Amino acid sequence: MHLSSKADRDGAVAAAERTVEIHRRLVDWLRPGQTLAEIDEFVARSLEQLDSRSAFLGYKAKPHPRFPSHACLSRNECVVHGTHDMDREPIVEGDLISIDIGVMHQGWIGDAAWTYAITEADEQALALMQAGRNCLARGIDAMQPGRPLLDWARAVQKHAEDECGFKLIRGLGGHGYGRTLHGPPFISNVVPKHPSEWADAFNPFKPGMLVAVEPMLSIGSDSVRSEGRGWPLFSSDHSLSVHYESDVLITEDGPVNLTAGLFELPDVVATG
């Protein structure tokens, strides 16, 4: 999606702002003892209050069934695409939960994820979360007009794996979006070993381009498994995982993070 007018930009900004607002509300609301279903219901109510609907509910991607939840709720070893009905156990102190919010507002999409620790987190979990946040920030800084999409992956992989010693999940990455949830280009989080792994790698970032970028990290594994449950994807070695995602508009002057407010949110919630 390439934005070509002020009205387009205003629409994309409004959807992104609602995505951030729901995350802000979640920070104030999340508590131990809540189920994934209750969290999904809270997201649904917030979407309605913000004159929006879920961009995820009912989403169809082969070979999966339609996505059953308003948000993606990925807990601990679940990397992405967690559903409200995959686990009935309530969240507990020390859990990490990555919440991916997809907003549809007046024809425009907002799509952003953040990871939260419930009440507390050990040193390794906090390091993993900080690495995920830093990957997102450094990767966005590298998204300069005229530079190849590959620059994103170089920045993200250098920090996550070379500097922090964690693993980026292979085969998953960011995407174009706008009036539809997913579209070209695919944006890998890792540098390809062969050109066939990422055909768009040397295509440039162009002014007007609207993309959702999303590093996914785990402590031990760079691959995922589905466990036959359909949508949820889990780290293949059961290791702790995090997911961060922002909406970015490329301009003549550089990248603009439409969901920059997420960086103001705490890593640990429900501490009071």
Image (cartoon, rainbow, N blue to C red):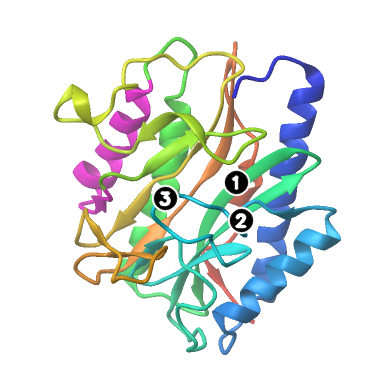
Amino acid carrying label 2: it is Ile
Residue assigned mark 1 = 111
Residue at disc 3, secondary structure: loop
Single out the mark in the foreground, 3 or 2: 3
- Tell whether 21 sits left or right of 161: right
Image quadrant in which you'd find residue 177: top right
Is residue 164 magenta-colored?
yes
> Do callouts 2 and 1 mark residues in contact (Cβ within 8 Å)?
yes
Amino acid carrying label 1: it is Asp
- Tell whether 222 sits left or right of 19: left
**Marks 3 and 2, Cα distance to the nearest angstrom?**
21 Å
| Residue at horizontal 41 percent and vertical 75 percent from the top | 121
Residue assigned mark 3 = 62
Give the residues drawn in magenta, as a range.
Answer: 149-169
Is residue 161 magenta-colored?
yes
- The disc at residue 101 is 2
Quarter occupied by the C terminus: bottom right
Single out the mark in the foreground, 1 or 3: 3
Q: Earlier in the sequence, mark 3 or mark 2?
A: 3
| Residue at horizontal 28 percent and vertical 28 percent from the top | 198
Residue at disc 2, secondary structure: strand
- Asked whether residue 242 is in view, the answer is yes
Quarter occupied by the N terminus: top right
Amino acid carrying label 3: it is Lys
